[in-house]
Image (cartoon, rainbow, N blue to C red):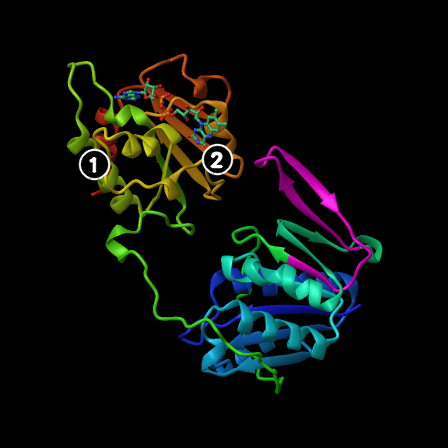
Amino acid sequence: MSVLALVHVDSDGSMARPAREAMAAAAGLASQLGSPLAVGLIGADVSAAAAVAGGCGAVRLLGVSGAVFGEPRYVTDAAAAEAICRAADATLVVIAGTSRWSRVAAGVAQRLGGRADTHVTRLSAEGGAVSVARWYYRQRIEAVTSRSERPWILLVEPGTQEPWDGPSVAIPIDMVPVTLPAIRTTVTGVRAPSTGEQTIRPDAAVLLVAGAGWTKKQPDGQTHVPEAEVLILGFLKGARASLGGSKSLDDLSGEGQAVLPFMTHLNQVGQTGSSPRHRKGLATCCHGEEPHVVGWRFISERRAINLNPNCGWAQGKTDVLYVADAFEVMKRVNGLLT
Ligand SMILES: Cc1cc2nc3c(=O)[nH]c(=O)nc-3n(C[C@H](O)[C@H](O)[C@H](O)COP(=O)(O)OP(=O)(O)OC[C@H]3O[C@@H](n4cnc5c(N)ncnc54)[C@H](O)[C@@H]3O)c2cc1C
């Protein structure tokens, strides 16, 4: 059995956290199996990453480089991955479950006559039998799967592993030639929100969830949306927190009501939203209904602020429920943060 960690190198030559997580997962699997580990690097220039990758116990480094491989594009990503998998003769291929890799993994597995599994959260090789764990039904059921087909491509869910962070060791890199078919896709640029607008921070220690209550009439009979905006943004800035939202709050924008302009559907947490992995979470003005709370599966320390002592959070879904006015509480909290 041979294990291959396959990673994309960023445009600045570094390896992003999901790539280093996949590398650490592959190294752990190889050591459990007592199998050799190879690392495959793909990017415009892989030389800086090669020195780092050599430190994770890899006995072999393989690379595909050139400007054309720096950009995410199905045809080039799939061809590079296929070439490295063949050169490494890998039976287990561990890659990060990023959108870029998720797009090509199944196609590469098909070309190699293997299989791919996504959203892997744990890898194990007990007694030499490899199995992986993943969640189903919006994180309600965890299943452990094994397969006999090889190569087996495993997309590791970002945020589930400790990233590789060891000493750099220089080992020689074998550059793998790739025969590319005609390229019909041109990358014309990247559009990303400016950092000031960025409210989703997967690496943050704290998640603040805003619910629809922030936009509802308050005890004085008025709505206070501008004040809510200042309080929420103040907490995000002061605590370097990530922002989640309930479906009701996210949907308000579609209904033409007063809304928080920095909230989009990407912030939605829950059954039809995301299941972020922050250590702590604070729900504010959010009722705590099951389709929302199921998105909190991976938040280990939970607190909620709600005026209603009978809200959903009170039904055992949070560690601490503050029965209080979130406007008042967050004003005090933000004061402590400055
Ligand atoms: C198939 C399906 C999928 C769904 N998927 C999702 C999903 O992915 N994510 C999701 O969030 N929902 C989802 N929902 C909807 C979910 O059931 C709830 O309707 C939604 O989460 C409610 O949002 P909310 O708690 O923000 O709003 P509300 O239910 O309107 O609650 C607002 C809360 O704010 C409180 N409040 C008001 N003012 C204050 C104040 N000053 N201080 C403190 N508290 C205050 C109120 O007491 C109230 O509890 C789904 C539903 C279905 C049927």
Query: Dot 2 lies on which element?
Result: loop
* Residue 48 x, y percent position in the rendering: 48, 80
Q: Tag 1: Cα neighbours inside 10 Å, few (<14), some, or many (≥20)? A: some
Decide: is 217 above or below 197.
above
In the picture, residue 289 is in which quadrant?
Answer: top left
Residue matched to label 1: 229
* Residue 151 x, y percent position in the rendering: 75, 64
* Residue at x 46% of width, y 71% of height: 185
Quadrant location, ligand no. 1: top left
Task: Answer whether labels 1 and 2 touch (C-beta < 8 Å).
Answer: no
Is residue 166 visible to the viewer in this orientation of the structure? no
Numbered badge on residue 254: none
Query: Quick check: is 135 in the magenta stretch?
Result: yes
Three-letter amino acid code of the residue under disc 1: Glu
* Residue at x 45% of width, y 81% of height: 67
Decide: is 282 above or below 236.
above
Query: Dot 1 lies on which element?
Result: helix
Query: Quick check: is 19 in the magenta stretch?
Result: no
Decide: is 338 above or below 110.
above
Left or right: where 291 falls relative to 232: right
* Residue 255 x, y percent position in the rendering: 28, 29
Is disc 2's CB within 8 Å of ligand 1? yes
* Residue at x 60% of width, y 78% of height: 54
Left or right: where 182 falls relative to 325: right
Three-letter amino acid code of the residue under disc 2: Thr
Magenta residues (range): 130-154
| Quadrant position of the N terminus in the picture | bottom right
Residue matched to label 2: 272
Left or right: where 284 falls relative to 125: left
Q: Tag 2: Cα neighbours inside 10 Å, few (<14), some, or many (≥20)? A: some
Is residue 42 visible to the viewer in this orientation of the structure? yes
* Residue 218 x, y percent position in the rendering: 21, 18
